[in-house]
Image (cartoon, rainbow, N blue to C red):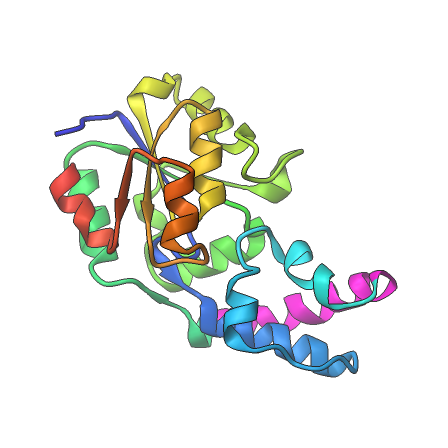
């Protein structure tokens, strides 16, 4: 059994299923700007790089600022109505805290919306630290976010594990020299994840009960 000191979690696709909210806000934004809506799979496959990179491929560059404003205003409410925890997430977090693990969040989602999710779904209290890409120079797959979290707790890479859902999470973990566990409930296919050779691949977040 692997026994780290610190467990770092991604949010979307890992602990939280916010895809219905993202899809609704995304297509609402496109319609408001006169662009055709996109299908669910196309949108889902673009998630994970932050909201600016989510919208950028589908609109003209000079519409991006306006699109972000529309998206973020709509998304604040959509998150509350259409996001939920994956099965047994809260039970898992309670279990890990009782085992005295340090827990942190590392998300490419902006801080404002990460906090909306964590508070609404009543899991913020389980985390010792929350860090999002809008507070940093680089987004994942750059390892900066993981390195900053480890530095905060004076934890070495060998004492930490990162849990995410995408190929970019596996890349970020490898670059930070952190053992990375990828759950296949997110935006990347299993084949894409396998190519990055993470420490473990799991199909459900509840499998962490057996790993820790």
Q: Is residue 91 inside the magenta stretch? A: no
- Quarter holding the C terminus is top left
Q: Vertically, is 84 above or below 208?
A: below
Q: Which residues are magenta?
A: 61-79
Where on the picture, by quarter, is residue 68?
bottom right
Q: Is residue 17 left or right of residue 23?
A: left
Q: Vertically, is 34 above or below 75?
A: below
Q: Residue at x 60, y 52 (%)?
A: 50
- Quarter holding the N terminus is top left
Q: Residue at x 37, y 26 (%)?
A: 178
Residue 104: image location, x then y, percent: 38, 38
Q: Residue at x 20, y 45 (%)?
A: 208
Q: Is residue 76 inside the magenta stretch? A: yes
Residue 191: image location, x then y, percent: 39, 50
Q: Residue at x 56, y 78 (%)?
A: 39
Most frequent secondary structure within the magenta stretch: helix
Say if residue 79 shows up in the picture. Answer: yes
Say if residue 78 shows up in the picture. Answer: no
Q: Vertically, is 112 above or below 169?
A: below
């Amino acid at each position: 059994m692997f026994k780290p000191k610190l467990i770092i979690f991604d949010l979307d696709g890992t602990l939280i299923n916010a895809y219905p909210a993202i899809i609704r806000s995304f297509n609402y934004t496109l319609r408001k700007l006169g662009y055709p809506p996109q299908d669910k799979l196309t949108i889902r496959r673009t998630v994970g790089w932050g909201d600016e990179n989510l919208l950028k491929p589908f609109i003209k560059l000079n519409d991006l600022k306006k699109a972000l404003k529309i998206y973020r205003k709509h998304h604040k409410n959509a998150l509350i109505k259409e996001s939920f925890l994956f099965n047994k997430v809260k039970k898992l977090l309670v279990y890990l805290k009782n085992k005295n693990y340090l827990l942190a969040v590392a998300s490419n989602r902006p801080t404002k919306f990460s906090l909306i999710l964590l508070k609404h779904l009543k899991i913020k209290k389980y985390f010792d630290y929350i860090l999002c890409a809008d507070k940093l120079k680089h987004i994942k797959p750059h390892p900066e976010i993981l390195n900053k979290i480890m530095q905060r707790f004076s934890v070495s890479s060998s004492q930490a594990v990162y849990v995410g859902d995408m190929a970019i999470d596996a890349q970020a973990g490898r670059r930070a020299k952190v053992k990375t566990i990828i759950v296949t409930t997110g935006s990347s296919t299993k084949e894409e994840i396998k190519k990055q050779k993470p420490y473990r691949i799991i199909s459900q977040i509840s499998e962490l009960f057996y790993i820790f």
